[in-house]
Image (cartoon, rainbow, N blue to C red):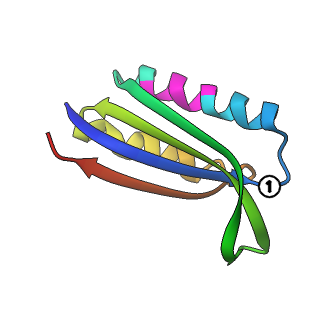
Amino acid sequence: MNKYELMIIYKENLSKEEVKKQIELLKEKISEQKGNVANEDFWGLKDFAYEMSKQVQGYYDILTIEIDPSKIDNIMKWLNHQQETVLKTMLTRLED
């Protein structure tokens, strides 16, 4: 298993409760893929330095996950289909 840092920016028009629900759905998806969430850092609603997709704010959440590299594509594809809630994602592999 590899360790990754996954940053997700959720759209500003969501409520904090809706964002938390989306995060729980993501955690369930990671568990379904036999992965583990080692750490979560929820930053909340933050201003952007510049406008992204006509949005000026977003909810930031950073997850440290441990998952088999062959399963990470399934997670990213699922996130890409969450276009009504997810604005941006960034995945970084962490060194051991």
Query: Magenta residues?
Result: 24-30
Tell me: residue 50, above or below residue 12: below
Q: x and y percent of residue 91 in the render? A: 39, 53
Report whether 7 appears left or right of 64: right
Magenta region includes residue 20: no
Tell me: residue 35, above or below residue 94: above
Which residue carries the number 1 mark? 12
Image quarter of the N terminus: top left
Q: Residue furthest bottom?
A: 50
> Looking at the rendering, which quadrant does residue 4 occupy?
top left
Residue situated in front as seen by the camera: 60 or 22: 60
Q: x and y percent of residue 46 in the render? A: 70, 56
Image quarter of the C terminus: top left
Report whether 41 appears left or right of 81: left
**Image point 75% across, 62% down: which residue?**
57
Residue situated in front as seen by the camera: 85 or 3: 3
**Image point 71% across, 28% down: which residue?**
21
Q: Residue furthest left?
A: 96
Report whether 94 appears left or right of 16: left
Residue situated in front as seen by the camera: 40 or 35: 40
**Image point 75% across, 52% down: which residue?**
84
Tell me: residue 49, above or below residue 73: below
**Circle 1 sits in a helix, a strand or a loop, which is it?**
loop
- Magenta stretch, overall SS: helix
**Image point 44% across, 21% down: which residue?**
32
- The crowding category of the residue bearing disc 1, from other C-alpha atoms within 10 Å (few below 14, some 14 to 19, many at least 20), is some
Q: x and y percent of residue 19 in the render? A: 73, 37
How many numbered marks, from 0 up? 1
Q: x and y percent of residue 45 in the render? A: 73, 50
Amino acid type of disc 1?
A: Glu
